[in-house]
Amino acid sequence: MASVTVIGAQWGDEGKGKIVDWLASRADAVVRFQGGHNAGHTLVVGEQVYKLSLLPSGIVTGTLSIIGNGVVLDPWALKAEFDKLTGQGVTINADNFAIADNCPLILPLHRDLDGLREQAAGSGKIGTTGRGIGPAYEDKVGRRAIRVCDLAHLDALDSQLDRLCAHHDALRAGFGQPPVDRAALLADLAEIAPFVLQFAQPVWKRLNKVRKAGARILFEGAQGVLLDVDHGTYPFVTSSNTVSGTAASGSGLGPNATGFVLGIVKAYTTRVGSGPFPTELEDETGQRLGERGHEFGTVTGRKRRCGWFDAVLVRQSCAISGVTGIALTKLDVLDGFDKVKICTGYRLRGKVLDYFPSHAADQAAVEPIYEEMDGWQGTTAGARSWADLPAQAIKYIQRVQELIETPVALVSTSPEREDTILVRDPFVD
């Protein structure tokens, strides 16, 4: 049986939730392998709308859903999301949900530090969600994190708290804040521990078992490749690796387990927060894309910046992540445009580039080179076969896959699960 790894090939918000939900209905296990509760996935199943930020998308279908060790876990955010979904009738228990016991925790002190840094940064703000994800990853690599397994040994936490508080107290003092209240932190952890520990286990072992049994495993990425801490628009990136290779290290399965890599690609481009955006449209066209695409963050509610499709960026993302095929989403947002444009290259100080440079100053200075195509007046919304699409929309799709040098595997034509054109089945190919 094949496995599938789903990643965003732009700056996130590509519509991964719907695609992962569609694939999860055919999978035996769904795994989150990086990020935190800054990931926003909206699922529409019939008349019901589910908004997820931490739980894997398979949970709404009862599919085995796992939070891997590559995730940083806010246990209180998890409890709130758990309560919300169970209130919507979703069943979540130890049979269909598991958390890696070596998963690092996001603590209140991480949220504090995240907010203090952004407030002090002024014009240098990165635009984080303020949820403590970055500081939690810092403590993980700094070897001072408190992990899920530590919740079962709170009485032996003194030495770890010494290391953690020595670091954070110094930072807090620099911002004029009091030291960490260790007693309050321990009390909070003791209160949340029973809820988290009922799901904690060595998930690498469980995943290896289900894989040997022939299960179909779906690896669910968060954010997008252009926010990868190594390969993204640094420093305006997230604090984890978002590329497909992280599915192996962030789940406990080897690199040969990731299978078909499906890159989710929006038919235009959006970005939330600060950072370079070569094709951004700050005019009526950009406004129209945002309004038609309902471009507001699932988690933050922040308005997304909008622009034309950037084939250079997506081609780069597909190469870096070894994308096998893409899922093109939100094609219907382009319905009714007389003309549509695709960025095919950049000009940088008189030189033509076919890639996105690494330095922030160069990224901010590039000018897009556009190819213009005729739009289409018919609708693509709800299409489930090529025959349902206007001819010019098909030409647009074909040109996209030529420019990004990666074939289209799926086309999503609405938020509804079944409004999908299947070109190549990731679980078969």
Image: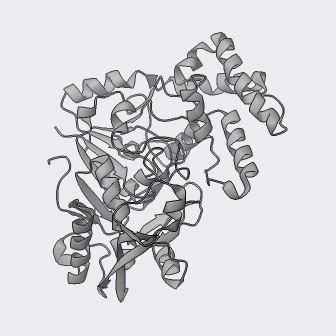
The residue drawn where x is 50% and y is 54% is 359
Residue 137 appears left or right of 266 = right
Q: Residue 93 appears at what percent x and percent y?
A: 44, 32
Specify whether residue 9 is in view. yes
Report the quarter where the N terminus lies: top left
Q: Residue 302 appears at what percent x and percent y?
A: 60, 62
Name the residue nearer the viewer: 378 or 235: 235
Residue 364 to residue 151: above or below: below
The part of the image, by quadrant, that contains residue 269 is bottom left
The part of the image, by quadrant, that contains residue 10 is bottom left
Q: Residue 305 appears at what percent x and percent y?
A: 53, 68
Query: How is the protein colored in the picture?
Result: one colour
Q: Residue 404 appears at what percent x and percent y?
A: 27, 63
Q: Residue furthest front?
A: 350
The residue drawn where x is 59% and y is 40% is 134
Residue 412 appears left or right of 282 = left
Count of numbered labels shown in the rendering: 0
Specify whether residue 295 is in view. no
Residue 41 to residue 189: above or below: below
The residue drawn where x is 66% and y is 25% is 189
Q: Residue furthest top?
A: 156
Name the residue nearer the viewer: 57 or 48: 57
The residue drawn where x is 48% and y is 44% is 229
The part of the image, by quadrant, that contains residue 399 is bottom left
Residue 186 appears left or right of 277 = right
